[in-house]
Amino acid sequence: MWWVTTWKNGASALGLQRELGLKTYWTAWTWLHKLRRAMVRPSRDRLSSRVKLDETCVGGAEEGVIGRLTHNKVLVLVAAQEEGQRIGRIRLRRVAELTQATVRECVEEAVERGSVLRTDGLNVYQGLAGYVHEPVVVKKQAEDASTVLPRVHRVASLLKRWLLGTHHGAVRPEHLNDDLDEFAFRFNRRTSALRGKLFYRLAQQAVQVEPVPYQALIRHITPVPNTRDRGDWSERNTHSGDWVQIVDEDGNKAPRISRTGSLPAEEQHTPNKADAQDPCGGSKACIGHPRLHDRFLCL
């Protein structure tokens, strides 16, 4: 946890594995995703006062698309609070599609009612009752969008650079929200001179959030066998009946899972006498896998 918080540019699962000398990549991957879940305080304050709101696309270059149309990229809503000429706190959320319903849901979760929302002229931002909406039609302005809404564009640019620099772009859409939470956690505390405060805050929040077992982290992953995609989840995944074996491109195997996310009976962890000495005691907070149980950080 200290290593994760003291790295200013963020942490990767491979870096965590090397630093701790873990035998398997999946142990580091699971620990890191659990810590990312803990980076969101359950009752955190929402943005207030004046907030800039815009959307951006995360992913590689696409050909044959116009404007906001995308087939392979992921849409991310970006909200940035104004603090004079500076950027205040931010909120980021992945959305499946850009509609008035999804925008309203994200805004109500992240922004206090009565706040001033400044957006571009896109119609999905209309109808935000309870907020003071200030739309700006970029086409009617002499400046471009990055000048009219500089804060959210700067945050989006920093986010993409962070994903490319720390993770080399190897981020699955299913887990992008966890990476967005880590980026927001670090960005909102960027002015902290003492890195120990970040460690203290993360440790404090880790005991407040609900436990997330390994099966829950990978439940929504759909392996794609026999493809040329060299992503960290798709190549060389094998199916055996109702069971799926996920293998990354380095040959590291994750525990087999069913299509519902459960482990085979022979690989499930059964509490024994030794577990009485273990803080997790084979509970649901544990990863529940014998090969990883002894080295697991229960959150």
Image (cartoon, rainbow, N blue to C red):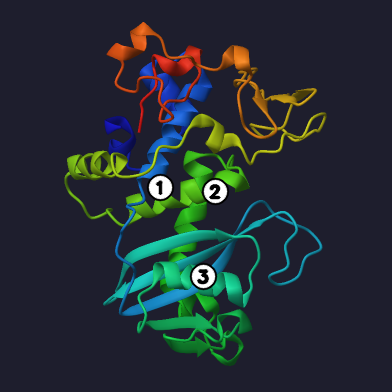
Seen at 59% across and 35% down, the residue is: 218
Left or right: 82, with 108 as reference point: left
Q: Residues within 10 Å of mark 3 (few under 14, many from 20)?
A: few
Pick the quarter of the image with the N terminus.
top left
- Above or below: residue 105 compared with residue 220: below
- Above or below: residue 164 compared with residue 113: above
Tell me, yes or no, if residue 36 can be seen here: yes
Question: What is the spatial separation of the Cα atoms under label 1 and label 2, in whole angstroms?
Answer: 10 Å
Judging by the rendered image, the residue that carries numbered circle 1 is 182
Under mark 1, the amino acid is Glu
Q: Quadrant of residue 244?
A: top right
Front residue of 299 and 194: 299
Question: What is the spatial separation of the Cα atoms under label 1 and label 3, in whole angstroms?
Answer: 21 Å
In the rendered image, residue 275, in percent from the top left (x then y), is placed at: 35, 13
Front residue of 31 and 63: 31
Judging by the rendered image, the residue that carries numbered circle 2 is 176
Q: Residues within 10 Å of mark 2 (few under 14, many from 20)?
A: some
Q: Are marks 1 and 3 in contact (CB under 8 Å)?
A: no
Judging by the rendered image, the residue that carries numbered circle 3 is 105
- Above or below: residue 282 compared with residue 223: above
In the rendered image, residue 179, in percent from the top left (x then y), is placed at: 48, 46
Mark closest to the chain's N terminus, 1 or 2: 2
Left or right: 202, with 197 as reference point: right
